[in-house]
Image (cartoon, helix red, strand yellow):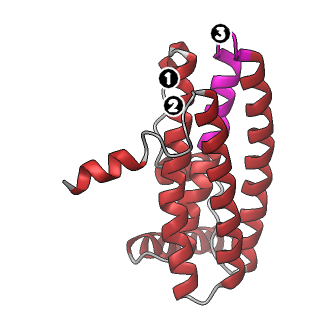
Amino acid sequence: MTTTTIEDRYAAEQAQTEHDHHVPTAGAMTNHILANLHISIVKFHQVRWSVKGPLALSIRQLLTTYIATYRSQFDALGELLLDEGEIVSTTTKEYHDYNMLQESGDKKYYTATDQLNELVHDADTHNLFIDRAIKLAEKENRPALATFLVTLRGTNNHIIRELQAILGNSARTGLDDEDEDEDD
């Protein structure tokens, strides 16, 4: 294979990716989900390594489970996109560009409550993209992708509930209220 052929193939991939993100498609939306999973794994580590307080040990154990879960889902979702004939993000730059979560090094100094609250909101943000991708997958008649995404939605709902419980909240505390405020 010549360098020109590789460059041409990559340029065509980038053009298709750009098009898909402006249409949007289930594949493009799912690449946002991949990016969010990738960044969430990093953020889970940040909290796991920096959380302080009486619940630190249990929070670390919980986040270790979430990291393993998200890594497994990240890998399975990438494979599923390939099965669907989609382009899969494979570079740190792509994950950075498609990520919809906020990260910052100073967040490791937040209180445990603020760190967990941010993770709750991150999982809720994930769900916005998952819901969009589910609708697109159904519209595009991609039942395997839709089914996987529904399961991922359930995982995020469970993570939200568990983290909210540590914070002394019910599952949707502070999440749906924000949506209702926007309607006013």
Q: Are marks 1 and 3 in contact (CB under 8 Å)?
A: no
Q: Residues within 10 Å of mark 3 (few under 14, many from 20)?
A: few
Magenta: main secondary structure: helix
The residue that mark 3 highlights is: 53
Residue 166: x percent and y percent? 64, 28
Q: Looking at the figure, which quarter contains the N terminus?
A: bottom right
Element type at marker 3? loop
Q: Nearer the viewer, residue 28 or 127?
A: 127
Of residue 43 and residue 151, the one placed in the foreground of this image is: 151
Q: Image point 52% across, 87% down: which residue?
A: 139
Q: What number is the disc on residue 151?
A: none
Label 2 neighbourhood size at 10 Å, few (<14), some (14-19), many (20+)?
some
Discs 1, 2 touching: Cβ within 8 Å: yes
Q: Is residue 51 magenta?
A: yes
Q: Give, as a single range, the part of the protein colored magenta.
A: 39-56
Q: Residue at x 57, y 28 (%)?
A: 168
The amino acid type found where label 1 is placed reads Asp
